[in-house]
Amino acid sequence: MTAPILYIEDEEDYQILVKRILSRAGLQVVTADTAAEGMKALGRRRPSLLILDINLPDTDGYAICRQLRQDPAWVDLPILMLTVRRRPDEWLRGFSSGANDYISKPLNPPELIERVVNCLEGKAHQFTGDGTAEYNLIQAAVAGNRSAFEVLIQKYKERLIDSLRGAAHDDAWAEDAAAYAFALAFENLSEFRGEASFYTWVYRIAMNEFTKRYRKPNAYSLDELTDGRESRLLTAVDRTEPLETTVADREVNHKALEALERVPEPFREVLELYFLQDLSYEAIAKRLRIPEGTVMSRLYKARRLLQESWNGLPAGRQGQPPVQGQPV
């Protein structure tokens, strides 16, 4: 029989809530109100997982985690920190203390179950005692903790935008280039080796992509689209080859609309919100009720899908110049 999960938490409401959520996944949870009680429980029976609050009456979760990791008997015990502390430096301190994973309150039940199951199945980031706290945070993101990447965005977004302003034409351009860099970084996160800081890595990505091929179109409205200027949307697409410049504008307009219609949801939605409604990443995140990092990565993929849709249109569907007087 699998050993129960031990949850050290001084708030009874959270004890009840976590027990209820995890019991639905067939997992047994025992609780302790203080660090002292938790250490006694560890001595009586080794749990399958330790879920650890940080704000405890007799000490903090960081100290417990460090104490356990200094004992060879507990080096391989999966530890998941569950806390109200959400700032990047608090996440980094958690991983520096030896946590395998970290989740912030308020609880999202599916996310809690996913993180717990990953720890139990050995899919979470494995503590080795090597690497910086930032490297361990990134490895948690690679292992599936999407919130860990949100922490990196929160920590470095403004700094990266400030650094890019010198190369960009305006603040909006710098913000878009930064978001694009974060999206590329997320797509290639498993390649991060920790030889430089994450900021240095994402800055290099931003400058590389920015100077090679990335250009942000001028903002335009839905009125411009209906007026027959929708081909401007295509300037947002990453291109491996330039689009045929000899095609008549009306043909391009027809093809642009058809390419956009072929982009599946939810990617078409984020394209329309960003390019047609000119919403910021933060505004889109609030509208769709998803993390800002998800908006960045979704928009990154949406651009690729739009380019693929454009390139994949049959030659006969690329539009013909309309007859004089025929409505467009």
Image (spheres, helix red, strand yellow):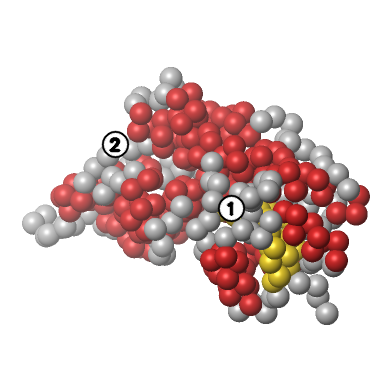
Q: Quadrant of the C terminus?
A: bottom left
Q: Residues within 10 Å of mark 1 (few under 14, many from 20)?
A: many
Identify the mark at residue 5; answer none if there is no mark: none
Note whether 310 is above or below 48 in the view shown: above
In the rendered structure, the answer to whether residue 122 lies left or right of residue 115 reads right
Query: Where residue 307 appears, x then y in whole percent?
Result: 44, 51
Q: Residues within 10 Å of mark 2 (few under 14, many from 20)?
A: few
In the rendered structure, the answer to whether residue 146 lies left or right of residue 231 reads right
Q: Amino acid at mark 1?
A: Thr
Tag 1 residue: 83
Identify the mark at residue 218; answer none if there is no mark: 2
Q: Secondary structure at mark 2?
A: loop
Q: Secondary structure at mark 1?
A: strand
Q: Quadrant of the N terminus?
A: bottom right
Q: Is residue 269 visible?
A: yes
Q: Nearer the viewer, residue 322 or 50?
A: 50
